[in-house]
Image (cartoon, grey):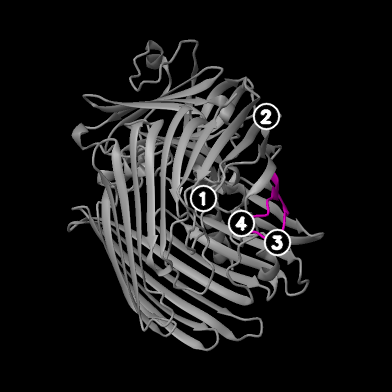
Amino acid sequence: MRKIFLTALICLGGVFFLWSQEVKKVGALKTEAEIIVDGALNEAIWQKAPSASEFIQFEPQRGKPATLRTVVRVLYDDKYIYFGFLCYDPQPEKIAANQTKRDADLREDDAVSVFLDTFHDRRSCYFFITNLLGTQLDGRITENGKTMETTWDGIWKSAGRQTDFGWTVEMAIDLSSMKYPPGEGKVWGVNFGRFIPRNLEMSFWTGPLESPQKVSQFGDLVGLNLKPAQKRGYLIPHIITKLEEGQKSEVQVGLDANYSFSQTVSGHLTINPDFATVEADQEQINLTRFELRLPEKRNFFLEGSEIYRQRIRLFYSRRIADIYGGVKIYGKSGGYEFSGMSVQTKETEYNQEGSANFTVFRVKKDVFKSSNIGFLLANKYINGRHKGTAGFDTALYFSNTFKFTGQLAMSYGDYNSQNIAFFLRPSYDSATFHIHLRYTHLGERFGDNANEVGYIRDDNRHEFDSNITKTFWLKRWGIDRVKYSSNYNIYWGMDKTLRSWEIVEGLSFDFTNKFSFRTDHIQEYKLYEKEFRNHRTKFTLGYNTREWQSASLAYSFGRNFDLDFKLLEGSLNYKITRDFSFQYALTRLAYHPDPQGRSTWIHVLRASNYFTNDLFVKVFYQVNTAIDKHNIQVLFVYRFQPPFGFIQVAYQKGTGRFGEKGVQGHTLFLKLTYMF
């Protein structure tokens, strides 16, 4: 027993040693000089700015020095915080710079990143990523890397410039667009990154990291003397004119308003927001009998949506139709992060139950070093009745690799029994290995209530789930990387009847010549009106999938609910010129036999031309032959006050809800938005 006790004590001490490893620090120089953000770093003050260098690889050789040198310099004044990157590259002709769309995945280009933990809470941060073209990707990371969302849009400037030694970047981030506690001698958490896709390399200033989003492993940005941001609020009115074939012309006026009650708490008001010009949902193949979860695309619901994300999805904003208006509040103070939202829906042709009020409240409390506990309430009030969900959740980090997540929830409404749900999930995550075990309980009536406001694919289950994923970096025999994953899932009904089991195996290879190959195999048992044995095998061949310009082709075959099927999927991303690019996706599903006529062709085309980063035209077109759907949208945008003030002209035809044929005739929208 003494040996066991000593061994456990040594292991525990090792965990705390790793958990409390030395933190890198960099300062920031306050300046009165004017900084012109042109990517050149030619102002004399840049030479005096504190710098960070000696980046460490996250991939492929974790813990090794980065293969190419990167230096970051930091300045700030009362309005902006500035970052200057010097990216050394002996082969500047191979620098990938393709993406021009805001919030595109810039890690597919040569790019640099800044992560700012402005509350220094080791849990959440803002991130800013840009490439040689100055294209912007920003967002927020929460729960120590568990959630990464690109829906938050900050106000910042960025520019890149190619040089004889590689390339340089300048960023100027408007302090008014971020929340932070002002004061003297403040410390922020910080990290810097660089992406070199041709080498599959990601390197960061701190490390070796267990994950690029692991906020608890960031360094410190010290010596900040910060005043409250000068601008407390802004108004964004918009006006839209709509001309639709066979319909009366319409004029719609709306308003968005933001106000900062303090540097850490803000509110948002929207009246008659524009949802009409949002890109239609892309048609998808659904081989299950469950409802598909569709991504949110409406700005009002996107901003700050990361705080509402949970494994048991108690709030799903796609349950909310068009709205007359709504209010939101978000803030962080004293270790509490909180958000609230209330909206009133319109009665539309898709929502004939009448106007309803949706109210959501979320609060999280920081505990220990990087952990939290939270509470969420989502309520729908309609025809004098309340329906919704409420529950607690937690994410407990015992080290940088081991964590426990859990949730306990109750739904209410038409059913007041069998309405409890919970899950327990320990997991281990390192840079190359993941394993988790999960047990979930979903009461027989939990989803009947919860789906008024949330997203529950299926209830009435006792469920066990496990997953193992391992990445091997070979860098030999023409192979860069091999990745293996295995998932096993099984669940019973509350009456202990076996309802389903599923085994998923996957193996992928990334080759040095930029080709990739992946194979997946699924075996499953389902019990519905009878027992089904489904199986699917899939082979995927890709080229240059590590960068944006890429192509892939996948072929699947198997048996699905007593029907044999073949599925062909293809995609192509190609840049014709520096400014003009297009994406094409093909899906061909063929059933045999096909008694319900579900075989289909789906074509999706996206094309864009960026005259500048703020002047562009986009085209979206899709066809689904099974429902005779033809949908097109052409969008022209000039952002004269990025990202909020712009002129937008949109043309649409055939827009309809997901899985339904659109009947909309030729329609033209003109939208003007201005920020005061």
Where disc 1 sits, the SS reads loop
Q: Evaluate whether residue 64 shows in this view.
A: no
Residue at mark 4 to residue at mark 3: CA–CA distance: 18 Å
Nearest to N terminus: mark 4 or mark 2: 2
Q: Is residue 344 magenta?
A: yes
Residue at mark 1 to residue at mark 3: CA–CA distance: 27 Å
Residue highlighted by disc 1: 246
| Residue 586: percent from left, percent from top | 32, 61
- Residue neighbourhood size for the residue with mark 2, other residues' Cα within 10 Å, grouped as few (<14), some (14–19), many (≥20): many
Q: Nearer the viewer, mark 3 or mark 2?
A: 3
Three-letter code, disc 4: Tyr
Decide if residue 333 is on the left or right side of residue 639: right
Three-letter code, disc 1: Gly
The one of 49 and 137 positioned closer to us in this rendering = 137
Residue 242 higher or lower than 347, as above or below: above
Where disc 3 sits, the SS reads loop
Looking at the rendered structure, which numbered label has been put on residue 316?
A: 4
The one of 72 and 498 positioned closer to us in this rendering = 498
Residue highlighted by disc 3: 353
Looking at the rendered structure, which numbered label has been put on residue 260?
A: 2
Residue at mark 3 to residue at mark 2: CA–CA distance: 36 Å
| Residue 240: percent from left, percent from top | 55, 37
Q: Evaluate whether residue 490 shows in this view.
A: yes
- Residue neighbourhood size for the residue with mark 4, other residues' Cα within 10 Å, grouped as few (<14), some (14–19), many (≥20): many
Where disc 2 sits, the SS reads strand
Nearest to N terminus: mark 1 or mark 3: 1
The picture quadrant where one finds residue 225 is top right
